[in-house]
């Protein structure tokens, strides 16, 4: 394979890795936003121990047992935290891959 073909292949790899990185960052941000909403809901549930609780189901609100709702939100919070850590690890791996490919590309162009 010629130097030009190698360089083109590396550029394609870089572009693919950048696209993957962008997708992971979007998913990470969506997860972070959802996690913030869950934490806020849990905080509100802790503030008002006496009021009726409701859960959105589609376009309507349905009465829900407070403890059951808190339990569901805690589980979802834990799932989102695990997902967020997974995205952070994936983002780090992709960043390392990009740096490695960029270094190879630079070396290839220097030859």
Image (cartoon, rainbow, N blue to C red):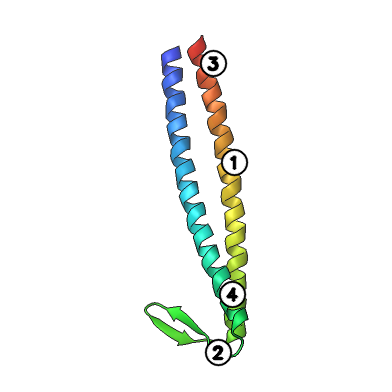
Q: Which mark is residue 92?
A: 1
**Which callout, 1 or 4, points to the residue nearer the camera?**
4
Work out which residue is located at the far left of the displayed protein and give it: 59
Circle 2 packing at 10 Å, graded few (<14), some (14-19), many (20+), is few
Earlier in the chain: of badge 2 and badge 4, it is: 4
Please provide percent x and percent y for residue 88.
59, 48
Location of residue 80 (image quadrant)? bottom right
Mark 4 highlights which residue? 42
Residue, x 58% and y 69% (percent of image)?
39
Residue, x 46% and y 30% (percent of image)?
13
Mark 2 highlights which residue? 51
Q: Is residue 50 above or below residue 15?
A: below
Circles 1 and 4 in contact, beta carbons < 8 Å = no
Work out which residue is located at the far top of the displayed protein and give it: 111
The span from disc 2 to disc 3 (Cα, nearest Å) is 66 Å
The span from disc 1 to disc 2 (Cα, nearest Å) is 44 Å
Judging from the image, what secondary structure is the residue with disc 4 in? helix
Judging from the image, what secondary structure is the residue with disc 2 in? loop
């Amino acid at each position: 394979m010629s130097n030009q073909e190698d360089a083109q292949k590396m550029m394609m790899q870089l572009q693919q890795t950048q696209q993957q990185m962008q997708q992971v960052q979007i998913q990470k941000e969506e997860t972070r936003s959802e996690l913030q909403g869950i934490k806020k809901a849990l905080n509100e549930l802790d503030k008002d121990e006496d009021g009726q609780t409701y859960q959105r189901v589609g376009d309507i609100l349905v009465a829900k047992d407070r403890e059951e709702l808190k339990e569901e939100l805690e589980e979802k919070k834990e799932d989102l935290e695990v997902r967020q850590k997974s995205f952070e690890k994936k983002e780090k791996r992709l960043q390392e891959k990009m740096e490695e490919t960029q270094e190879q590309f630079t070396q290839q162009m220097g030859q």
